[in-house]
Amino acid sequence: MRKYWRLFILVIPVLCLVSMFTYYLPPVHDRLAWRVDEFVLMVKYKINPPGKVVFVPQSQETAGVQITAPASATPSPLPTSSPTQVDVEAQTTHTPAPTAEPTATITPLPDKIALSGVRYTNQHGGRTNYCAPANLTMALTFWGWDGELNDVGKVLKPDDRDKNVMPYELADYVENYTDLRVVSRVGGDLELLKRFIAAGYAVLVEKGTYLYDTADVYSWMGHYQVLTGYDDSEGYFIAQDSYVGPDWKAPYDVLIDGWRAFNYTYMIIYPPEKEADVIELLGPDADETTNYQNAAAKASNEIVALSGIEQYFAWYNRGTNLMQLQDYAGAAAAYDEAFAVYPTIPEAERPWRMLWYQTGAYFAYFYAGRYWDVIYLAETTLDTMQSDKNLEESYYWLGMAKAALGDPAGAIEAYRKSLEFHEGFDPPLYQLNLLGVEP
């Protein structure tokens, strides 16, 4: 019996070594690695649920350190029981908007419409998390673009570890790699969506939803959809959903609830010759500053009308809109209120990935002089990731705050970490150049 026991002890290490060698053979590793990663991530979620992680702002200002914001603005009052239109005068520095003067027209909309022309693209056909490339591909094919998913993916997500593609990155692709144009706005509503669809435009929206992630954990995350139709009698939009399938029926109320999480963001892609038409359809929101002012007022109205997670999103939207208007003090105060609501949301429902997608709080706290809050927020956000802590934006702002606090070594380390996950990312490259060091 002892003889067999000794043999068993000798064989086990050999089998382990053989198994490890076999696992790392490229054909085997490519097939199994993602399953192993999913299992490890699922175990980590069970041990330390990311929904438990809560950020608590310290509301401090850092004395003795002066960082000049890009522009100044008069702080806007926080909403009361009777919120009013936000009054902020500020210049923005985003993608130039159409400049023609919009004219108001009222055209009766049909009760239902379904546009054709989108080549459905499944996000599972690409690499990991190809939601953004798949949806942009569909939106482009609506106008006859003949590219493929991987054409978009290799630009938008050169690194599979990148957790999110921002709307501005989608817009940059349209402007730089196609002959089409694009306009991105916030604060949209159902009538606006139907107005564009009825006029012959597919609409790309960003929304929140609850899905199973790569670790088979059901939780909140961001998602894009291409809307190509609607039906008032049944109360739904027709969505080309890269996750679930083509011609998906998206009920109006479900869309609104998810869309609110992303400040009602929408994008219109169009041929250059249709620019005047797009301006007219946008109405006053063709002007970007007016658009953010209107969206801030909309968020204020929702804050006093909603509760729970919906109120959290409304406060967050107000912060985002004020940040875009460069009212950093007002934005920081709004984000404080959002983070105060967050712990009241049931853990399983908490949108703990919020800073993966929307980084306005970093801007607001930084330019309000609250550098330690930037650090705490970045560290809290990275703590939710469990596995690879690969958010280039969080590392960038971590570096910015450390530099402002007189820690250049820490800043350089954070900037380089940002570039590790997003090679060629301009913001950290610029900061490293200012510091006179190599990436």
Image (cartoon, rainbow, N blue to C red):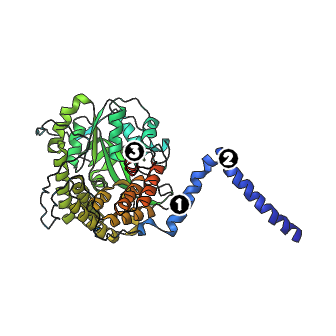
Q: Compare marks 2 and 3 and give the one earlier in the sequence.
A: 2
Vertical relation: 236 (above or below) 1: above
Identity, as a three-letter code, of the amino acid under mark 1: Leu
Tag 1 secondary structure: helix
| Residue 239 in view in this figure | no
Q: Amino acid at mark 2?
A: Leu
Horizontal and vertical percent position of residue 244: 42, 47
Is 233 left or right of 136, judged from the image as shown? Answer: left
Q: Is residue 198 above or below residue 266?
A: above
Whole-angstrom CA distance, mark 2 to mark 1, is 22 Å
Label 1 environment density (alpha carbons within 10 Å; few <14, some 14–19, many ≥20): many
Disc assigned to residue 132 = 3
On the image, numbered disc 2 is attached to which residue?
A: 25
Relative image position of residue 315 (x, y in whole percent) = 25, 62
Question: Which of pointers 2 and 3 indicates the residue nearer the eye?
Answer: 2
**Which residue does the image show at 19% across and 39% down from the upper left?**
110
User: Along the horizontal axis of the image, is 258 left or right of 199?
Assistant: right
Q: CA distance from mark 2 to mark 3?
A: 31 Å
Decide if residue 284 is on the left or right side of residue 144: left
Q: Secondary structure at mark 2?
A: loop
Image-quadrant location for residue 132: top left
How many C-alpha atoms fall within 10 Å of the one at disc 3: few (<14), some, or many (≥20)?
many
